[in-house]
Image (spheres, helix red, strand yellow):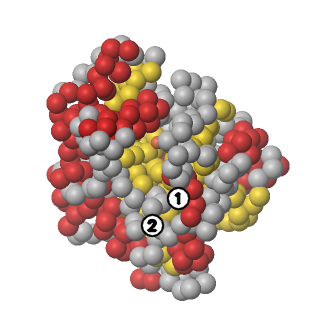
Amino acid sequence: MTTALPLTANFKSTDPLALADVDHVRLYVGNAKQAAFFYAHAFGFTVQQYRDLTTGSRDEASYLLTQGNIRLLLTTGLNAHHPACHDVAHYGDGVRDIAFTVQDATKAWEQAVRNGAKPAHEPMELKDETGTVTLAAIKTFGRCVHTFVSRRGGYELGKVKTGGTFMPQFAKVKNFGPNDYNRQNPCGLECVDHCVGNVGLGGMNQWVQWYSDVLGFSLFKHFDDKDISTEYSALMSKVMDSGAGLIKIPINEPAEGKRKSQVQEYLDFTENVPGVQHLAFRCNDALETVAELRRRGVDFLRLPDTYYEKVWQRVEGEMHANVKEDHDRIKELGILVDADDEGYLLQLFTMPLQDRPTLFIEIICRRGSQSFGKGNFRALFESLELEQARRGNL
Ligand code: FE2
């Protein structure tokens, strides 16, 4: 089993772009108060802190949701001129920022800009009696940015992880019923495993190069580092790796296929502006996690029973994985399984989280395998064909 290795404890590096942790993932949403309730109820996040009119924030409201080492920040604008309102109107609810904790945000930002990044905003310091948070951001694909975050004093990430205040102007949420329920019924999500960007035709190699040049990521050399392009799935993807087990960022672009590419469908609903297609959260017990999420009403992609007629032969017969989880239970819960030469993984995808067919969440549990379930692409479509054949429609 692998775990993410955030480096925040005693983190020291001479490289200004050494990333210590995924500080937070910020989503721009139409109504952060209601979205917080949704992510708390459906996915078991603790609604831990907030910043709004009552804490002195005049133009936006934000809620910090936490689970394991995942920090989601849900932000909504309080007037039409706020960038969140613009983005939600044009692209819908979605990921704005994958923010990284670094030792010195100003130095990281300066280095990234020297490496060719376009600035989103210059370094700014938020300071009060508790400590200091420095934020500086660069633009990445489409609607998204990466903010570098450095923290001093009471705002150090280690303190935030144990319940400390997230940033100036944030206040602790008290007496929120779903938080008590979640403590008693945990969903077991541990960290952000990967975060996938959808870009336009011809954009994939450009952004792969960008992650290499600007942030020093490397192309993930692995079982499925080749382009994924089948006549059905009709997308191409390359995976960029931050190193140190922190995060991977696959970049998808549409490809010609028998059906409209899922990437193009996404772009059709974002005015062709690239953005995050899915966030993958890692757990360590896929059966427990998926069972709990299903109890809570999370809507997962359904696959036909025929998938399970082939999956064990593929994963255990051909790939020699020894899947220790109860096979019947895996089928009952509709979980997908894949393997590579290092081990296996269990994964499942939610339906889109909003009415636009854009952002969704993946649940992934790794048992040695570091890949992304490429084997499921074909298996899924083969299963669908089998069903079609049974109905006489192939
Ligand atoms: Fe994924």
- Residue 36 in view here: yes
| CB of mark 2 near ligand 1 (< 8 Å) | no
Considering the numbered disc 2 on the image, is that residue within a helix, a strand or a loop? loop
Q: Measuring from the top left, give residue 66's x and y in whole percent.
A: 37, 55
- Alpha carbon of mark 1 to alpha carbon of mark 2: how far? 10 Å
Q: Earlier in the sequence, mark 1 or mark 2?
A: 1
User: Considering depth in this image, is 79 or 385 the residue closer to the camera?
Assistant: 385
Q: Measuring from the top left, give residue 114's x and y in whole percent.
A: 83, 49
Q: Which residue is mark 1?
A: 265
User: Considering depth in this image, is 151 or 285 the residue closer to the camera?
Assistant: 285
Please name the residue shown 54% across and 77% down the image. 89
Which numbered disc covers residue 211? Answer: none
**Residue 61, above or below 262:** below
Using a 10 Å C-alpha cutoff, classify the residue at mark 2 as few (fewer than 14 neighbours), some (14 to 19) or many (20 or more). some
Q: Nearer the viewer, mark 1 or mark 2?
A: 1
> Could you tell me the amino acid type at mark 2?
Arg
